[in-house]
Each structure stands twice: as C-alpha cells, then as structure tokens.
Amino acid sequence: MHPAFSVIFLTTLLGAGQGMFLALVTGQVYSRIHLIDPQSSDYYFHGSLIALSLLVLGLSASFFHLGRPERAWRAAAKWRTSWLSREVIVLPMLMGLVAIFGLIQWMGWTDPFVVAGDNALPVDASLLVGVLGAVVAFALFVSTAMIYASVKFLQEWATPLTVANFTFFGLASGFMLAAAYSAYLENDLVTFFGTWSVIFTAIAFLSRGASLLRNRHLKYRSNLKTAIGVRHRDIAQKSQGFSAGSFNTREFFHHRASATLAVVRVLFMVLVFPVPVLLIGLAYMTKSPTLPIVAFLVQYLGLVAERWYFFAEAQHPQNLYYQAVS
Amino acid sequence: MTQLALVIDLNVCVGCHACVTSCKQWNTSGWAGPMVDENPYDANPTGTFFNRVQTFEVGQYPNTETVHFPKSCLHCEDPPCVPVCPTGASYKREDNGVVLVDYDKCIGCKYCSWACPYGVRELDEQQKVMKKCTLCIDRISDQTLPEAERKPACVMACPTSARLYGDVHDPDSEVSVAIRERGGYALMPEWGTQPANHYLPRQKNRMHITEEDLQRVDNPLQKEDITVYHGEETLEDVTW
C-alpha cells in the first residue's frame, strides 16, 4: 500500500493522545488508592490539555486523507458495518470526555461523592469521567486498528496482532509522554510513568515482533492464477491496459526499493524499542528533566517510521493486475 | 431476485479496447458527469476508467497463448466494498444487484478501494469521489430505449460479442446458460465475494455447427448439370 502521511500522523498522534490520557487516569487511580503521591489538579488539567491537543491534531490530520472533507460529517452514518464510522463516532466521544476530565480538574470539582472503605477509595467526578474515558480510549484503539485488521485480503493486516500493536504502541508512547511531561515539571512521577512505558514498550516489542515474523512467512491466497482464472504455471502480464499511471498504480504500492523497506524496519526497531528504554534508564539515574522528553520524541519518530512500514509492507491483491506496462 | 452481470468470453476477446473507449465515452457524457483525464497529451497521462483490458501471456515461448482480459466491477453478490463505506455512499441495488456509488455522499476516503481485491474502484482525482462501473445503470434501466439497446455500452460496442449481459439468477438467461454450459468462472473465489460477473474460459476443441450443417440441401452438383433431359429416368429418380 501507499503510505499516506495523513494516516500515519492520524494513527500515531491519536495513539499518543489516548495513551497520555490513559496514563493520567492511571496516575489518578493510583494516587486515589494511595499508592503514589497525589498530584495537583493543575497537573491533570495541563496533562489532559496535552492529550486533547494530540487528539485534535490527529483528527485534523485525518481530514487530509479525505477527498471531500466538507462532507466528513457523513462518515458517522454506517456504524453498524464500518469500523471507520465507529472510529469517527468514538473519537469525538473521547475528546469530549478528555475535555470534561480537564474541566473538572480545572474547576477543582474533585470532592469525593462516596468514600469506599476506610478512606481506601474516594470516588469523585474526575475518577468516574476518567474511568469512562479509559474505556472509550480502548474502544478507539480497537476501532482504529480494526479499520485495517478487518480488510481480510490485506493479509499483513488481517490479524489480531494489528489491534495489539496499535494498542501497545499507543500506551507506550502515551505513558512515555506522561513521563516526559512529569520530567519537564520536575515531578517525581517520571519513574512511575517511565516504568509503565518501558513495560508497554516491551509488550509492543513482542507483539510487533510476532507480526513481523508472521508476515515474513505469509502465504498469499491470491496469485495470477486465481486473479485471471487461468490454471497455468507460467503467466506473465504483457500489458496493464494503459501506458502511464492510474489510481491503481499509485494507491496500492509504495514505489520504493525493498532495500528502503529493510532500512525503515531496522530504523523503527531501534528507535521505538531500545533507544527510548535506554534513555529512560539513564533519566532514572541522572534525574534528568530532558532525557524523558528526548525519549518520547525518539519513540514517536520511530512510531512514524513503524506506521510507514506497516502501510508499505501490505501487499494488496489488486497489484496482481498491474504488473507490466509495455 | 435479479442479479445483472456481464459474462466475458475470453475465447473471442481480441483486446481491441472498444469496450474501454465506449465505456469512457458513454459514462463521461452521462448524468454522472465527466470521468476526468489529466495530462491527456503530456508525458504522464492519467484518468478515470471503469473498464480496462489487460493482456497476459500464458505458457513458455514458443508455446504461448495470449489472453486478453477485460476487467471492470464484478458486482459481487457479497461486495466487500459496501459494508466498509462509512457514509453509505457505496451500495448494492436491491432490485437488480448493481453495485453503485452515490457521488453526492462519497467523502473520498478510499476505504472501499482498499476493500476491493480486484482493484476496480478508482478515485476521480479531480472530483475526489470514488468511481466505478455502473453497468451503465442509466442505459439498462431506461424504459424509453428499445429493449435491444438496454445494455451496457461495452456490450453494445464489442465487435466480437465477447461480452454477454443478463440476469445470472435466471437459470434460462443467456448468461446463465453460458456459465453453466461453458465452464464460466469467477475471479479470486478464495475471498468469498461471489462476483456476479463471470468469465468463459478459452477452449480449443469447440466445434461450430451451423444450421446448414444440420439440414439436407439439394445436391449442389445438380445446378451444374447441363444435360438436356427428355422424360427418361435420371439419377435423381433413382436416389430420391
């Protein structure tokens, strides 16, 4: 497939935004049950502003993928069958919940309604909205990833690993961003978020590694024989029916050498996994306020490369019909 | 239920592209507006087509055979492009099974083109909406046309009658008979899309029997017989 930067930025920015929000909610739940120190409302308010801006940026990127962005509102119509529609519905829902979460923190409406146990779990509005938002954030991970995983003949994508990858990459980059944000504020939650980020990065490494291995050994179900229905070993296309390009030759191929793909694969494997983990490790030791920020930026850059590779790697069976010009 | 479709006879397609040009001409001048061409006289021409004729060589030289292979939307019975459309712009007509795009609802997200394994949907690069073969829905449903002309433009234009058109759900239609009796097949059956369009395979052992072959006709030699007869017994009287 042809990797479009609008979709690359859409999926990576949304992932980081969702992850950042999930990190904030996780932090809040932990502090409510007294496992970590409580943070000020401002911390959560500014944090949710960052998460919200990433979601808005992601949404804006999505418009560049549309031929007719002025009709984008129609895209919520077929939620019963289309994962794209479901994403279009769930994303504004999440944005609304993140905004409400931020508003509650900003207004300081954080007095608990109910306190469970002996001050073990105080329940306030932000906790309820946060947990609801977390559920919606996971629904968004599934919706975004299923857009790709549900196209069954794009065999590189049609696997539950796609959903796992999107989710764990989002969590890793979001928690990394929360660590970077905490480091910038010189807040002692860097270790908490950084450790979770390293855990999610490790799980993402396993699941992305699994999908890379799977795709390396993929057996394609379609070939020229089934494409034109001629049962013969030697079939070669002599003409695709036109001399220059078309939508079919542009949209479904990356037009890069396979060596480029190999380079990008190595690049993202290095930038997404070992480098940010090392940087976070160094940040623990040096208590550096900048290293976690660098770690996030490096990982995000790696994720852009990863998403580019994700698209470029997928072989669409329609390419069987567009093999030769002559 | 009716399922209109094309059946393409690979035996007789000669790759002349008459179906491609007639399709382009008819549909670009129709109610749906132009099928855009960009740089038509420049180095990199590109444009929107509903129908392409591709050429494949089968076998190894010198034992090769050339297969001209016209390909347009197959109007699948279970079209994967329809459920993925987020706006409902892509739909399958209930009454005749034709898969269509509502150009006024399409947002140009290209998802349907990703979801079509056959690559028969093309984004119009100027109008920014998805376009595809309509089976000339404006011709086939136009009751003011004489019945013989209620056919897709490509079928009307094909000089070798390689394209048959009709209802594949009617067992007695020309297309159903052709599929049944001549081994008609669907493309990429592995995906379960059940294309309505079928292809008739190339075959070399077909015997053509004409009406004259079956009827006994007069002895042609008789016409060249210049003998003058005077009522005597002739060869004709003996054999007839």
Image (cartoon, grey):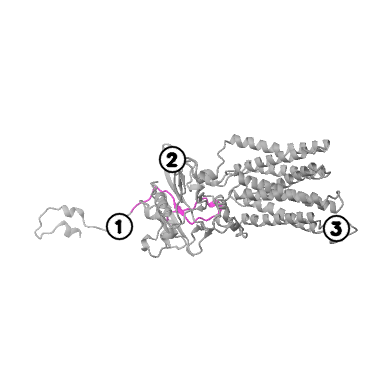
Q: Amino acid at mark 1?
A: Glu
| Magenta span contains residue B156 | no
- Gap in Å between the C-alphas at discs 3 and 1? 94 Å
Residue lying at 69% horizontally and 48% vertically, measured from the top left:
A54
Numbered-mark total: 3
Q: Chain of mark 2?
A: B
Tell me the residue that label 3 is attached to.
Answer: A122
Q: Position of residue A253 (x, y in %)?
A: 55, 42
As helix, strand or loop, the secondary structure at mark 1 comes to: helix
Q: Is residue A156 visible?
A: no
Q: Amino acid at mark 2?
A: Asp
Q: Amino acid at mark 3?
A: Pro
| Magenta span contains residue B184 | yes
Q: Which mark is residue B211?
A: 1
As helix, strand or loop, the secondary structure at mark 3 comes to: strand
Q: Chain of mark 3?
A: A
Q: Earlier in the sequence, mark 2 or mark 1?
A: 2
Position of B52 with respect to A99 (left or right) is: left
**Location of residue B216 by image quarter:** bottom left
Residue extending furthest toward the front: A107
Give the residues in magenta: B181-208
- Gap in Å between the C-alphas at discs 3 and 2? 71 Å
Q: Which mark is residue B42?
A: 2
